[in-house]
Image (cartoon, helix red, strand yellow):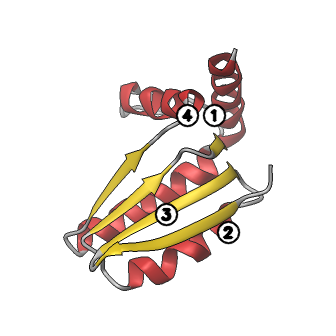
């Protein structure tokens, strides 16, 4: 599914970002373009509503990590809500991984994340 990104100001300094579809190598530029103007405002909180995000790979994770770094530098926070099971599984895997390199390439990581998400949908 092609990615759409909805953004909304919930209250001053608090934004809700709703990615709808897949966040992957083909859509990560669109995702990042939607985030940049919000991050430039140095918000207090960015809420990622993941209810309609059906897939994420390392490209999407990189955008989220970059956003987290930007928010940390300005004292902001990043939170997530309404994660689909397959997306939550990716976050669980990433939180459980040791800091040592586990995968030989980005492609190997993406293949692993893809398989885990498909298994979570069954």
Residue picked out by circle 1: 109
According to the image, label 4 marks what residue?
84
Horizontally, residue 67 falls left or right of residue 112, namely left
Residue at 55% of width from left, 35% of height from top? Answer: 87
Which of 26 and 38 lies nearest the eye of the viewer? Answer: 38
Looking at the picture, how far across and down is residue 59, in whole percent?
A: 62, 52
Please, what secondary structure does the residue beneath circle 1 have?
helix
| In this rendering, the label closer to the viewer, 1 or 2 | 2
Quick one: label 4, few (<14), some, or many (20+) residues within 10 Å?
some
Label 2, label 4: how far apart the Cα atoms are:
22 Å
Residue at screen point 68% across, 36% down: 110
Which circle marks residue 17 in the picture?
Answer: 3
* Disc 4 versus disc 1: nearer the observer: 4
Distance of label 3 from label 1 (alpha carbons)? 25 Å
Distance CA(mark 4)–CA(mark 1): 20 Å
In the displayed structure, 89 sits above or below 67; it is above
Q: Mark 2 points at which residue?
A: 29
């Amino acid at each position: 599914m092609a990615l759409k990104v909805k953004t909304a100001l919930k209250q001053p300094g608090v934004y809700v970002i709703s990615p709808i579809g897949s966040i992957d190598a083909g859509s990560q530029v669109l995702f990042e373009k939607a985030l940049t103007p919000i991050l430039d405002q140095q918000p207090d909180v960015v809420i990622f509503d993941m209810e309609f995000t059906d897939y994420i790979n390392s490209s999407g994770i990189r955008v989220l990590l970059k956003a987290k770094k930007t928010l940390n530098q300005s004292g902001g926070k990043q939170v997530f809500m309404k994660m689909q099971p397959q997306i939550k599984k990716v976050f669980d895997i990433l939180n459980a991984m040791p800091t040592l390199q586990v995968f030989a390439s980005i492609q190997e990581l993406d293949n692993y994340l893809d398989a885990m998400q498909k298994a979570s949908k069954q």
